[in-house]
Amino acid sequence: MLPLRTILHPTDFSEHSEFAFRVASSLARDYNARLILLHVIPPPMVIYAGGPVPAETWPSIEEVKERLRNMEGRTHHVRVESTVLEGDPVDKILQAAEETHSDVIVMGTHGRTALTRLLLGSVAESVIRKAPCPVLTAKPAAARMKALEESEANTEAGVAVGAHAE
């Protein structure tokens, strides 16, 4: 087994990230490793539909830091650090992994379909392809069950279902 001294957990505060946080915390506790919590605030994006319309509003840095402090408080017997970066999530996660000499990145995945990944991209998929260390993606069992049920429903309805790789 790889020696785990530093575990990087990028979070977007979603249900999937919450599950990955629990996995990362358990690994950090079991290996007596340092756990680094990271949230990346994406750059502002504007959509033009007859005029500029903000695509999404992101929480303030203060709100993000408070959420990370709450996560830190839920870890027991684990050395935890947290950081907030601004920029492209993939670039900043990879940068943080390099700078902290992370032994593994533990992150949630939303389990999007191939079409959704093609249209929207996938942070997890890009990190997996470019990371300087192993990447463990975690998806809650409920999400897996829902994906399986949807796949079975599509198959029963005669819809071709492609392979799903994560």
Image: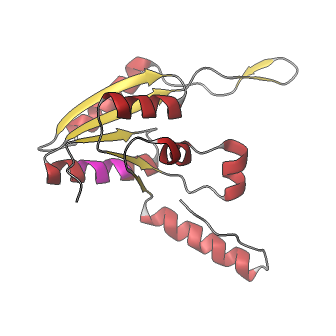
Quadrant of residue 152 within the rendered picture: bottom right
Quadrant of residue 76 within the rendered picture: top left
Q: Which residues are magenta?
A: 20-25
> What residue is drawn where x is 16% and y is 51%?
31
**Visible residue check, residue 67:** no
Model colouring: secondary structure
**Visible residue check, residue 152:** yes
Q: Position of residue 157 (x, y in %)?
A: 77, 79
Most frequent secondary structure within the magenta stretch:
helix
Q: Position of residue 22 (x, y in %)?
A: 30, 51
Q: Position of residue 8 (x, y in %)?
A: 32, 39
Q: Residue furthest right?
A: 50
> What residue is drawn where x is 46% and y is 65%?
142
Please state, as top left, top right, bottom left or bottom right, where the N terminus lies in the image.
bottom left
> What residue is drawn where x is 51% and y is 30%?
91
Towards the viewer: 102 or 120: 102
Q: Residue furthest bottom?
A: 156
Q: Is residue 16 above or below residue 91?
A: below
Q: Is residue 148 above or below residue 138?
A: below
Q: Position of residue 82 (x, y in %)?
A: 29, 29
Please tell me how many numbered marks the rendered image carries: 0
Q: Is residue 38 magenta?
A: no
Q: Is residue 46 above or below residue 74?
A: above
